[in-house]
Every structure is written in C-alpha cells, then in structure tokens.
C-alpha cells in the first residue's frame, strides 16, 4: 500500500520543489487540496488525518499552528516533517540532516517529528561539526561564516523583484547580525560561541556557497589543511549526497555549480601563513530545501533514497 503524503503549503517554492521530486518516487500517494481549501482548517485537518506523513512548507507561525493541528490527532496522527525554521532547535524534534553523524539517519527514520535544515545552516553545519568532533576546532573558537545564495532563497517577494526588475547584482543583508539560522548553526554545528554570520544574495536564481575562513595556527593542535580535508573525507566518503573534494582545492567556484541537484560539495583551500578557507557548495532549493526534504521523507517512510539509482548508474559507467 502506498504511503500517503500531504504537503501543507504545496504552492510555495519549497512545496513545489518537493512535489516535483516526488513524481519519480514509487510507493507514495500525494494528498492535495483544491486552491479554495488550502486555508480551510477543516479541510487541512481532514487531509492530515488521512496522511501517513505531513510536510509543512509554511511561514514559522503557520507551521507552529499546523504542528499543533497534527498533535491534536494523537498517536493515530501522521508523522511530521517541518520545512520551516520553527522547530529546528526545539526539544522533541530530530534535526533532518542525515549526514550529521553516524546515527542521524536512523534517528530520522524512527522519529515522528523531524525539522528540515535551513539552506545556509546545511553548509555551515557540514563544515563545522566534523572538525569539532575531531578536536580540530574548538566549540569556543571565534568563527566567521560568509555565504551567498541565489535569490530564490528569499521567498516570493525577492523572486518577483529580481525577475521583474533584474535586481541588484549582489547585496548583503541581515546586517543586524541576527539571522534566524544562527541558533540552528550553533546547536547542530556544535558551537558554544556565537559565530559572525554574514549572508548575501546574488542575481542568480539557485545556488549557494558557504565559507569559513580559519587561521590554522590558532586551532587546537594546529591541524594542517590536509588533515582537515582528510577529516571531511572520513565523514562523507560514503554519502550519496555529500562529496568532499580530496586534498586541497585551488580553482574557482561558481555558486551555481550544483544548481538543479540535491547534492553538496565540500572544499578545503589553503594558502601561506597557515590560512585556510572551508567551503560548502549546494543548491539552496536542493540539498538546502526541497531535496533535503525528499531525503528525509524517504527515511521516515522506509523508502530508498531517490539518488541511489543515480549512484548505481554512475558506478556502472
């Protein structure tokens, strides 16, 4: 019997991306409401009651309200995946980043409440957590995170502005330094000291680079850039979705290099005077949003990862 999924907020950018990706996944049935019913609480509750899994693609306050609706159904209610930032640091919710640690995918599979990671946080956590766990970076180190995203990560208003008026080529934002991803990066990245996070938007639709500059001689044990690269290899070399570039990278990186994919790449760049820059590249709508949600959906419903056939084809070639 097919598992039933209801996407509450299916008309938004993330919801549409999830629907598109689920078209090729067997063993599921999508429950959809007519446009006139999408804000009707009675119709939404009925769809939730019929579903095995509800995916929330809503603003934070609406996601909290929808989560309460699911909770009202009790133990017979569906599993819940929240793609908003409402529950990413909430007790009782499992963080939906399967590559976070060896047991994380199993925790996601067993949980009834999973929070999908933020796009910037996905890159930052992938860069920070392995080094903290390896003892190469202290949880109390001063950390700076710089990032650039495609404008699709800014929601409908930003998308409309860029596509109607061409938008600025590049802009910094959240300069009050209170971006909502910071608590998530701290908790799941393993930091005890608040990082300095500077996000930006470029005039391209999809793609992202997240970078962390480091002075290696100020880190515990003064690790080399090669040792850091090896730590990423050890953490991610079995992953379908995260690839760590071996050795030291010295080329150029286009933030759109993984646009349209659900993967992430990790790079270590090094220079003189013990300088290094750690970089994560991903599609902010792929591994940073809808692609991550589909990965979590597969785990929560006991389905194969949709990227597995692609890996088999690559190996066969």
Image (cartoon, rainbow, N blue to C red):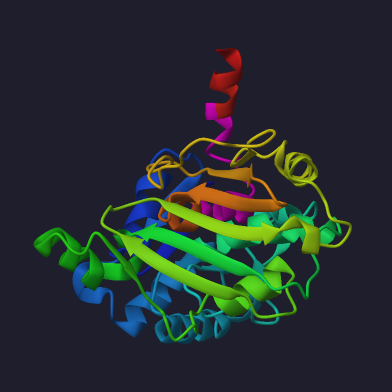
**Residue 274 percent location from the top left of the image:** 73, 52
Say left or right for 196 vs 5. right
- Residue at image coords 75%, 56%: 216
Is residue 303 covered in magenta? yes
Please tell me how many numbered marks the rendered image carries. Answer: 0
Q: Is residue 78 left or right of residue 108?
A: left
Q: Quadrant of residue 167?
A: bottom left
Residue 8 quadrant: bottom left
Q: Nearer the viewer, residue 98 or 221?
A: 221
Q: Is residue 41 above or below residue 136?
A: below
- Which of the 4 image quarters holds residue 96? bottom right
Taking 68 as reference, is 296 above or below it? above
Closer-to-camera residue (227/87): 227
- Residue 24: where, in percent of width, then height? 42, 38
Q: Residue furthest front?
A: 273
Residue beneath the point at 30% across and 69% down: 155
Q: Residue at x 60, y 60 (%)?
A: 212
Residue 137 or 116: which is nearer the viewer? 137
Q: Horizontally, is 18 left or right of 130 in the view?
A: left
What is the magenta range? 292-310
- Across and down, in percent, residue 136 comes to 82, 57
Q: Identify the residue at horizontal 58%, vertical 55% (top origin).
A: 296
Work out whether residue 152 can be spotted: yes
């Amino acid at each position: 019997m097919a598992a039933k999924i209801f996407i509450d907020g299916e008309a938004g950018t993330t919801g549409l991306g999830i629907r598109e990706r689920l078209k090729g996944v067997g063993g599921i049935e999508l429950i959809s409401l007519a446009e006139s019913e999408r804000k009707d609480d009675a119709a939404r509750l009925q769809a939730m009651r019929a579903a095995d899994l509800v995916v929330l693609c809503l603003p934070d306050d609406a996601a909290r309200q929808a989560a309460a609706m699911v909770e009202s159904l009790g133990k017979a209610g569906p599993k819940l995946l929240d793609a908003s930032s409402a529950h990413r640091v909430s007790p009782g919710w499992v963080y939906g980043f399967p590559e976070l640690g060896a047991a994380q995918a199993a925790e996601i599979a067993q949980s009834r409440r999973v929070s999908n990671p933020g796009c910037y946080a996905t890159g930052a956590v992938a860069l920070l957590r392995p080094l903290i766990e390896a003892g190469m970076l202290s949880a109390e180190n001063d950390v700076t995170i710089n990032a650039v995203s495609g404008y699709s990560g800014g929601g409908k208003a930003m998308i409309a502005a860029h596509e109607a008026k061409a938008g600025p080529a590049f802009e910094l934002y959240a300069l009050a330094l209170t971006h909502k991803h910071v608590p998530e990066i701290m908790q799941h990245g393993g930091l005890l000291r608040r990082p300095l996070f500077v996000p930006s938007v470029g005039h391209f639709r999809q793609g992202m680079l997240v970078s962390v500059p480091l002075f290696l001689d100020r880190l515990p044990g003064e690790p080399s850039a090669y040792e850091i690269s090896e730590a990423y290899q050890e953490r991610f070399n079995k992953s379908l979705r995260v690839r760590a570039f071996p050795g030291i990278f010295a080329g150029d990186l286009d933030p759109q290099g993984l646009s349209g994919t659900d993967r992430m790449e990790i790079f270590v760049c090094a220079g003189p005077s013990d300088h290094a820059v750690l970089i994560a590249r991903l599609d902010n709508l792929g591994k940073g949003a809808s692609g991550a949600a589909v990965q979590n959906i597969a785990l929560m419903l006991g389905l194969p990862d949709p990227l597995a056939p692609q890996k088999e084809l690559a190996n066969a070639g």
